[in-house]
Amino acid sequence: MEHYDVIVVGAGHAGCEAAAAAANLGSRTLLVTMNMATIGQMSCNPAMGGIAKGQIVREIDALGGYSGIVSDRSMIQFRMLNLSKGPAMWSPRTQNDRYRFSYEWRLMLEKTENLDFWQDMVSSLIIEGERVAGVRTSMGVDFRARSVVLTNGTFLNGLIHIGEKQIGGGRSGEKSATGITEQLVSLGFDAGRMKTGTPPRLDGRSIDYSVMVEQPGDEHPGKFSFTDTQPLKHQRSCHITYTNSEVHDMLRTGFDRSPMFNGRIRGLGPRYCPSIEDKIERFADKDRHQIFVEPEGWDTIEVYLNGFSTSLPEEVQYAALRKIPGLEKAKIFRPGYAIEYDYFPPTQLTHTLETKLVKGLYFAGQINGTTGYEEATCQGLMAGINAHRCAQEESPFTLKRSEAYIGVLIDDLITKGTEEPYRMFTSRAEHRILLRQDNADARLTPMGHALGLASDERLRKVEEKHTNVSGVRKQLEKLSLLPATINPYLESLGSTPVKQRLRAVAIIPRPDVHLADMMGRMAEVRDAILSVTADPETIQQVEILIKYEGYIHKEAEAANKILRFEDFKLKPDFNYHALESLSAEARQKLSHIRPDSIGQASRISGVSPSDISVLLVHLGK
């Protein structure tokens, strides 16, 4: 019987990041997967990042995770979304080569010291008292460990739906995992069912792109990782087309056989990524819906039809597709399908993602009710870090809501729970102006370095960037410009001209003014900045810090006030039912969730400000 510090079950996005983190921190780690050929597979769309999700990928990279590097090495297109809005909303997104992405993940994991692999299905956990002690596989092999991370994705009792057909499986062509749910329920865990879906994959040779709207990547593509990964020199375009009333009418002919509408699917699907039949039903007033036609890689003809997720019968899918402009002659490689799977409400976890019922057992990814690669990956990273620290008897590592989107996501899950697949949005973060994608390294790399996950070189780059940001700002603060130098630029923007000499820093807060443009129009500004750095990302961060200085300062103050409540700790065995001044709902919710602090208690749905006051009085605060 092999002995490990950490065992990770599942090699999807969460499992890969968990295994890498635990191994890189020094724990002897085993990654168990049902199929070594599908490590890090993009089961759904071939893309990483997006609104709020892109910030998460940059945070993972800043802490020393692998996802940003893998995404950069496999991307075929880069876009920075929401550039028309403020910098708190800017969100990087890559279109990726699906096969290269999986290949790069496996390559990086195989080069990771302390990491072993085993291909098999885990059928049960080895539990001794109140602690996990290892796993047992379907072949009857036992592996022992001090901590175990479950990242089972959609495989726990997975059931695929295509029209009236039901096929047991965790993904197309792969069997589901059985045994774990039943064991955990017998131990006292609550379990539920969720549903997600995927669209048909098409033969790109059968598509007429000439009638679609081309969607190219950015002219100057960026990247996710703060390391020296290379930005793209060439990119592949995506395309946009639309459904129409004929498409909708054709799809409706299959609604009586849809597992979504006839009750065969019990699990709730993702609210913000609905199936095409759900969109037609929920938005009956809309006569068309946008469809993104996305290439699956550099060298393949396979195409992903983003926005056309469906579980309707194959013949209905086929007939409806052929009424979409550009897809009149489309050939399907495989139809879309829905998949229903087990999950465990995440209020059963602590902030470290350790279960409250079994010590040393961690959950990460879709098993916690989330949807999306990025949400799963960051949970995997945090679970891997804490599984290692648990195995080595070190203190846990958590992130606050004011420190990272990762902290927001985990706090939302364990405090509020979720009854539908949870997806991250910028609106979920109350301090999002502090949690920008451009400053993820400044926020988190020192933490990652202190953990032992981010390298010395990563920390050196952050310190150098900080020095350069300060240096550029000082140059702009002391550079005095004449009206004759400033006004031609301001007038070209339709901005009010100045009448007297001004410091360069005083011009930047104007809405339409950008440092890169100033450098191009004013030699003095260009020379002053280039005397410190030529790095575009550093220059952009200087502009953001100057433009939004007041907002950033106010947000930091607000975050610090809220943090005071996080310092008021609550004992895990606190008897809330003994406090009759609490509302009945508060007593029930607090007893179930067992918050760590007054701060967490205040975020529980159903716990009112008056309930918090009662707790503060009881604590003598």
Image: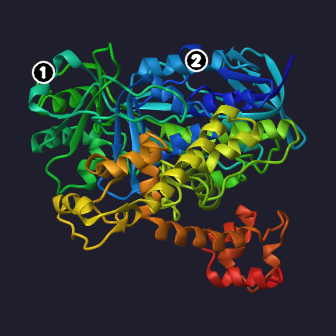
In the rendered view, would you say 518 is above or below 304?
A: below
Residue 95 figure quarter: top left
**Residue 164 shown left or right of residue 372 in the figure:** left
**In the image, what residue type sits under mark 1?**
Lys
Q: Secondary structure at mark 1?
A: loop
Q: Is residue 308 left or right of residue 197?
A: left
Give the residue at x 56% y 44%.
465
Residue 268: image x %, image y %?
Answer: 46, 49
Quarter of the figure with the C terminus: bottom right
Q: Is residue 444 left or right of residue 229?
A: right
- Residue at image location 44% in from the left, 17% down from the top: 99
The residue that disc 2 covers is: 106
Position of 94 with respect to 184 (left or right) is left
Indicate the position of residue 588 as horizontal and vertical percent values: 70, 71
SS at circle 2: helix
Looking at the image, which is closer to me, 482 or 198? Answer: 482
Q: What is the number of the mark on residue 329?
A: 1
Foreground mark, 1 or 2, reads 2
Three-letter amino acid code of the residue under disc 2: Arg
